[in-house]
Image: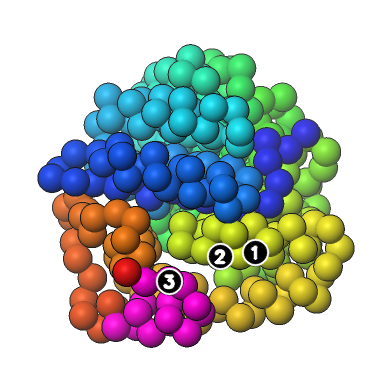
Amino acid sequence: MSIFKGSGVALVTPFKDGRIDYPALEGLIEWHIGSGTDALIVCGTTGEASTLSPVEKLSLVEFAIKKADGRIPVIAGAGSNDTSHSMYLSKEMEYAGADGLLIVTPYYNKATQAGLIKHYTAIADYVEIPIILYSVKSRTGLNITPATVKELKKHPNIRGIKEASGDISQICSIAALADHDFQLYSGNDDHTISMMALGAVGCISTVANIIPERYHQMTKDYLEGRHKAAAKKQLAMLPLIHAVFAEVNPIPVKAALHMMGKIQREYRLPLCDPSNETLYLLFDEMKRYGIPLK
């Protein structure tokens, strides 16, 4: 069974004066739930997890779970390039009440495919909640091959993959492995409907941070058989998606949320403010798309 279907938002982590801005985070969570977002993914790439301390990560997950209050699933990012640390985070997030885990591949030291199987199996053996694999070679330098996915999906706790390789041949091979117990999720906003046509059940999205209702409706349209309507929505949002990825994620999307009055425009180094060119591009595309600006 799917952990969720439709639009999962890779939620930003708002900061204020160097700390997590919990009032702003609560506002985002309520806005997403009210807008139809189908799942909250916290402590992921878009959430700047690599600059959060373990204490901050667990506090963030606990807060999101408490505020969501069972209304939609909360999936916690617990990936690391250290298997034992990922096991620790995964267990703590399970104790906190997470509905599932998103586990990115190890980075920097990376691994062989055999090492990946050992890494994910060790984590999956250690917890009792479902895991979504996360393959994003552009970030980590490490790809999960279809053969490795085929092996890992045998584990009862490994229930899906967020596929962000951009390699259509690989995506097709992994889509062929998806079934009732193992789901495919798009990891790229501009590929959502294309991947759903191959059998993906939704997306873990960055741009859904700023258009949650419309992103939810697009995926709902596809899931309910309104394929042409979903494709039309996907094509219409492409210029906005390109603007949101004009610089390294989540720099532009946090700037966009600041323009909307949702959060402070604050990052943790090495991320920094976007260029004026990016800000003008974001402003123009958000205005064109009809997003209210403060």
Residue 288 drawn at (x, y percent): 47, 84
In the image, what residue occupies the spot 78% across and 34% down?
Answer: 1
Residue 118 drawn at (x, y percent): 54, 28
The residue closer to the viewer here, 54 or 282, is 282
The residue closer to the viewer here, 9 or 80, is 9
In what element is the residue under mark 1?
helix
Outermost residue, left side: 17
Q: Which residue is mark 2?
A: 189
In the image, what residue occupies the spot 23% across and 59% down?
Answer: 265
In the image, what residue occupies the spot 31% across and 39% down?
Answer: 23
Q: Mark 3: give few (<14), some (14-19) or many (20+) Cα within 10 Å.
A: few
Q: Which residue is mark 3?
A: 292
Span of residues in magenta: 280-293
Circle 3/circle 2 CB separation < 8 Å: no
Inspect this view and state whether residue 145 appears: no
Left or right? Give the position of 278 relative to 64.
Answer: left
Left or right? Give the position of 266 relative to 93.
Answer: left
The amino acid sitting under disc 1 is Thr
Q: Which residue is mark 1?
A: 192
Q: Quadrant of residue 256?
A: bottom left
In the image, what residue occupies the spot 74% across and 30% down?
Answer: 154
Foreground disc of the pair 1, 3: 3
